[in-house]
Amino acid sequence: MPGIKQETPAGGTVRVRFAPSPTGPLHIGGARSALFNWLFARRYGGVFLVRIEDTDLERSSKVSEHSILDDLLWLGIDWDEGIRVGGACGPYRQTERLELYRKHAGELLARRYAYYCYCSEEDLAAERESLLARGEMPRYLGRCRSLDSAGRARLEGEGRRPVVRFKVPSDRIVNINDLVRGEVSFECSGIGDFIIMKSDGIPTYNFAVVVDDHTMSISHVIRAEEHLSNTPRQVLLYEALGWLAPDFAHISLILGRDRSKMSKRHGATAIGQYREKGYLPEALVNFLALLGWSPEGEEEIFSLEQLKEMFSLDRVAKSPAVFDLDKLNWLNGHYIRRLPVERLTELAIPFLERAGYIKPPVSPERYNWLKLAVSSVQEYLSCVEEVVAHVGIYFTDEVTLEGEEAGIVMAQDQVPAVLTTLRDKLSGACELTARLARELLKEVGKETGAGGKKVFMPVRIALTGRTHGPELNQVMAILGREKVAARLTAALERDNKDL
């Protein structure tokens, strides 16, 4: 692609990172960023690092941190270095690196690339309103740039605690050769002197991320497009500190199907929510990979191993990715149908327990029966949570007709004869298997003269209340002889009452 740099450093080692803020769960966008970084590192034999940006002291929590890390591992995204793992560049939590940030802020102050600012919130608000009134972009105009030691002493005597601001050159244009977006330019005149250290000694994002990325030898910064506007500030900091900046790659936003920024109205936004509903990690990873990245060819089903071999930044799109829940459901259904029934049953058991259908512990006999029940509905599931609705037919003693069509079918003339004949035949059966059930249905058709749907539909409705569902002979075998006979009797009695 013209204007795009080579995506790997010549003779260098790829080192990329994912640096979440533990202020909430791992969201779809963050998971995709982590995945793209992980795939990039694995593709080129590099290092994937995870660190924690917890300088938002009020909102950060260990609960969120653990949740994010656990969800990454659940997706199959492991890391070579960082939090929980360790490494030579630690510590990997920002609140444990404060002395390092203060040291480098001191260097910038000593070299006059930064200065102390004592402006109050009221001062800044007034300046912002003045700029907006003139139709200009709000920014800090450098009121404290020229303060001498006497001026600083006077303001500190008033009890003011300063922040540290970086001096942005007003006559510069910062050019960035983005690995996804190509050449991007920013005029420094619209940036303003920005804060790098707050008055409480905590670094701001733009400063901490530069120090962290440099001291952790990050070669590529692959992150969401919303961070693109931060990049010129970070490039200026790299230059002032005498450090080489990493290569940047800004991946597209994720939009809902209505082309607006993704939010809760488009569906769940956190990985944990999909995990709780019974989406499979392999399906989510496959889906996330296709949000903004396109493989060669038409294939859309990829394992993590395949993605590691194929992923590259030159196939990451500039245009926004669209979060299509229908596509995710289709992918997840595809992966569910490929699961061994044992694994699907294990995944289904917690949902069945919450629904009150089963109670632990599950005996071997009960487990084998559950496998049959789960297997019969496997092809209908788009997420494991749906198993509860589909297998409910096996756990209830009350059958309720669903939909107008069911009532119409049960009013047909041949129905009493079909149900009675099948019930009579069941009385002589010892064990109702799927094979025997199929044979009995055929015999009922021959004896009543009502073949095909004239037999299958009323029997299905009598047993389940539904006009569609798993193979009828499987349903009969799973219910067992006694339950089938009891439901046929109940259907006959219901029909008699309706006459």
Image (cartoon, helix red, strand yellow):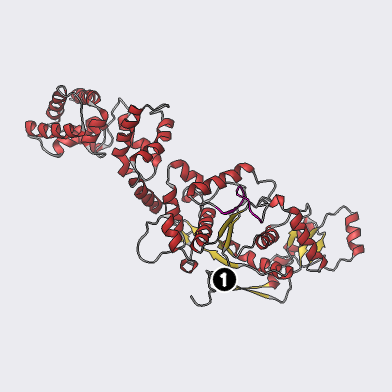
Is disc 1 surrounded by few (<14), some (14 to 19) or many (20+) residues within 10 Å?
few
- Which percent across, then down, holds residue 296? 39, 66
Residue drawn at (37%, 26%) of the image? 363
* Amino acid at dot 1: Gly
Dominant SS type (magenta):
loop
Q: Nearer the viewer, residue 443 or 463?
A: 443
Q: Quadrant of the C terminus?
A: top left
Is residue 221 or residue 217 the one in the foreground? 217
For residue 270, say whether it is visible. no
Secondary structure state at the residue bearing disc 1: loop
In this view, 213 is above or below 452:
below
Report if residue 430 lies within the magenta region.
Answer: no
Region of the chain picked out in magenta, as a range: 79-88
Residue 470 location, quadrant: top left
* 144 to 369, vertically: above or below: below
Is residue 121 shown left or right of residue 320? right
Q: Quadrant of residue 13?
A: bottom right
Q: Residue at x 35, y 63 (%)?
A: 298
Tell me if 407 is positioned left or right of 41 in this view.
Answer: left
Up the image or down, 374 lies above or below 302; here it is above
Where does the image place residue 191, in percent across and percent down from the top left? 69, 68
On the image, which quarter does residue 114 sit in? bottom right
Q: How many marks?
A: 1
Q: Nearer the viewer, residue 185 or 124?
A: 185
* Residue 86 is a magenta residue: yes
Residue wearing tag 1: 11
Percent position (x, y) of residue 30? 54, 54
**Residue 272 pos. (x, y %):** 51, 44
Q: Is residue 203 visible?
A: yes
Classify 128 as above or below 346: below
**Viewer-closest of 223 and 302:** 302
